[in-house]
Amino acid sequence: MSSEIHWFVMYTAPRAEKKVAQRLREKNVEVFLPMITEIRQWSDRKKKVERPLFNGYLFVKTDKARLWESLQVQGAVKFVNFSGDHAIVRQQEIDAIQRIITTGVAVEVETTEIEEGEQVKILGGPLQGFEGECVQKGNQDYFVIRVPSIAQTVMVNVPRKFLEVIG
């Protein structure tokens, strides 16, 4: 039984992400639930609301032996599997998502297949120093972080002047 610690992807009941994350933290399980703030417009007012970046998903850092234990909390549904193996997210992707969320830059999540982009380094702005993939969409450049285990891609619009092609 491997006791290696990885980031696994947990699927939760609808709109239960925050509660599940809280319950897991109470059991001393390390959890990452990326949240973004959006402005919602009602007819009479605007309000800032926080919502999960990936609906129905959160990341749990544990070893395989404790996965079952994590699923015992109310609202947890299952861990994402790929052909019989638990999906794992690399620390690199987790770090990138964490940094994007802390900078507060506008983020889009794309669930359709995005073609390969060019390898770039970001030279300025809040994501300066990041290296990764950049794609063009509708005449704009987007820095992308792929999370293949949930078939989602995080996209951040970065002006071309801040990009240096490296690959």
Image (cartoon, rainbow, N blue to C red):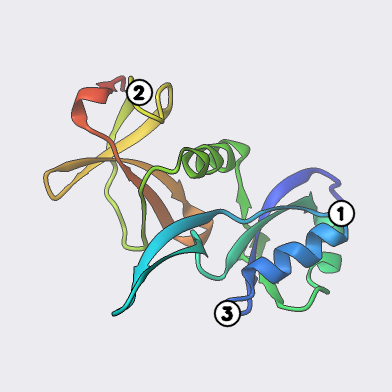
Q: Residue at x 80, y 57 (%)?
A: 25
- Alpha-carbon span between mark 2 and mark 1: 36 Å
Q: Earlier in the sequence, mark 3 or mark 2?
A: 3
- Alpha-carbon span between mark 3 and mark 2: 36 Å
Q: Earlier in the sequence, mark 2 or mark 1?
A: 1
- Alpha-carbon span between mark 3 and mark 1: 23 Å
Q: Earlier in the sequence, mark 3 or mark 1?
A: 3
| Residue at mark 2 | 121
Place of residue 52 in the rendered image (x, y in percent of width and height, measured from the top left): 53, 62
Mark 3 residue crowding within 10 angstroms, few (<14) / some (14–19) / many (20+): few
- The residue closer to the viewer here, 122 or 10, is 122
Amino acid under label 2? Answer: Lys
Q: Farthest left residue?
A: 139
Q: Residue at x 43, y 21 (%)?
A: 129
Amino acid under label 1? Answer: Asn
Q: Residue at x 29, y 43 (%)?
A: 116
Circle 3/circle 1 CB separation < 8 Å: no
| Residue at mark 1 | 28
Is residue 147 at least partly visible in the picture?
Answer: yes
- Residue 38, located in which quarter of the rendered image? bottom left
In this rendering, the answer to whether 47 lies above or below 99 is below
- Please tell me whether mark 2 sits on a helix, a strand or a loop: strand
Place of residue 34 in the rendered image (x, y in percent of width and height, measured from the top left): 56, 53
- The residue closer to the viewer here, 111 or 107, is 107
| Residue at mark 3 | 14
Mark whose residue sits in front, 3 or 2:
3
Q: How many marks?
A: 3
Mark 2 residue crowding within 10 angstroms, few (<14) / some (14–19) / many (20+): many
Is residue 82 at least partly visible in the picture?
Answer: no
Place of residue 131 in the rendered image (x, y in percent of width and height, measured from the top left): 41, 26
- Residue 104, located in which quarter of the rendered image? top left
Circle 2/circle 1 CB separation < 8 Å: no
